[in-house]
Every structure is written in C-alpha cells, then in structure tokens.
Image (cartoon, rainbow, N blue to C red):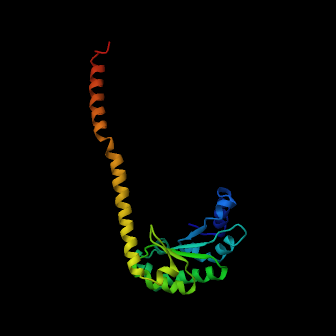
Amino acid sequence: MVESAYAASKYVAAKNIVFTSDEQKDTDFLFNMETITGFNNRDSLMEAICLPGGAEGVVFGRVDFVGSMGWARETINLQQTTDFALEVSKLCKKFDKQLVVGGGVSIESIDALRQIHQIRLDRFETRKVVFDTGKALSSDIEAGLVDAVHFELLWLQNKRDYYSGIALEDAKRIEMLALRWEELKSWKASGRNK
C-alpha cells in the first residue's frame, strides 16, 4: 500500500535494488492504491512512478479503499466508489500506466468494471484469478467469475487439507513420545536410574 510520493519513491528504489534490470523485463511492477490518503495524493504518486526506472501502474483495491473511509464493504460496487476508480483510471490513461482493479470482484462488479474499462482498465482480479479486461468483458464474464470462485474454493480446501495432513501426520508419534517421556520422568524421579 502506497500513500505518498515519498513512499512510491521508496517502493521504486527497493524494486530497483532487489530486481536486476533483466529480471524486471519479465515482470510488471504496480503499487496498491487502497486508501483515501493515497487517492488524495494520486497525482504525486503517479509522477513518482513515472520517473525513469519507475513502476508500470496501479492496483486499485476497493475493499481496503472503502474501509479507509469508514464505509461498509458492501459499498464497493456503488457508483460513489466507482467514481473514485474512474478518477484513477483517467490518471492511468493520461500517464499510460496500467490499472488493475481488485477487492471483492464478483458478478455484482461487472457494471463498475465496464465503466472503468471505458477509460482504462487492463486487468481485474479476484483473490486468486487475474482477468484480462478486454478478453473477459467481451466474453461470458459471469461464467468466468463463477469459475474463479470455484477455483478459489478448491484452492482453499486443498490448502486446508494439505496443512491439516502435515499437522496430523505425527500425532500418533507425539502421543507415544509423550507417554514414554512421562514414564521416563517417573523412572528418573524414583531413583532407579542409579
């Protein structure tokens, strides 16, 4: 999350230290604009990432954004929230920077995504699936979003099962060693170890 031009410059500097120029060729670097403070500083943020070696764009995170204003999560698809995203879209278009929208993307978000795309919207994302806007909005996006939710459900179930399996893998051995340790403590305390 970036909220000031200084923070954006630190992000860019860190990116340029950690990733070689060769590594940067295959990666797009975007910063998260997720608060009203970041939005209010959007012009200086954009100028900071437009410097040589800067970043490729912005991810507008709607859930955190509305939260930063004390609004309920349910307001992410209201026009007043979309209006903020439209302003960021205009800025990305002006500076030729990518725009990605995330935060509670669902079937209810389609109208907002279409509005933003009319100005500039390169991609939108659920937590685990990234959609190319041009392709997604010109096809059966409703089915795609249903599949994205299904994928995330399967992902989380797999993660739960995997880590549960790891956690339970040694349960019997732990129980056996705990019993053995209790026996050995008793044996040691009784003085039979002399």
Residue 183, x across and y down, in percent: 26, 26
Q: Is residue 25 left or right of residue 157?
A: right
Between 108 and 132, the residue placed more toward the observer is 132
Residue 92, x across and y down, in percent: 62, 79
Q: Please say if 170 is above or below 94.
A: above
Q: Please say if 121 is above or below 19.
A: below
**In the rendered image, which quarter contains the C terminus?**
top left
**In the rendered image, which quarter contains the N terminus?**
bottom right
Q: Residue at x 41, y 76 (%)?
A: 144
Between 70 and 153, the residue placed more toward the observer is 153
Q: Is residue 78 visible?
A: no
Residue 71, x across and y down, in percent: 44, 76
Between 139 and 92, the residue placed more toward the observer is 139
Residue 18, x across and y down, in percent: 65, 56
Q: Quadrant of residue 145?
A: bottom left
Q: How many marks?
A: 0
Q: Quadrant of residue 155?
A: bottom left
Q: Is residue 62 visible?
A: yes
Q: Quadrant of residue 158?
A: bottom left
Between 149 and 49, the residue placed more toward the observer is 149
Residue most extreme to the top? 194
Residue most extreme to the right? 52
Q: Residue at x 45, y 85 (%)?
A: 111
Q: Please say if 170 is above or below 101.
A: above
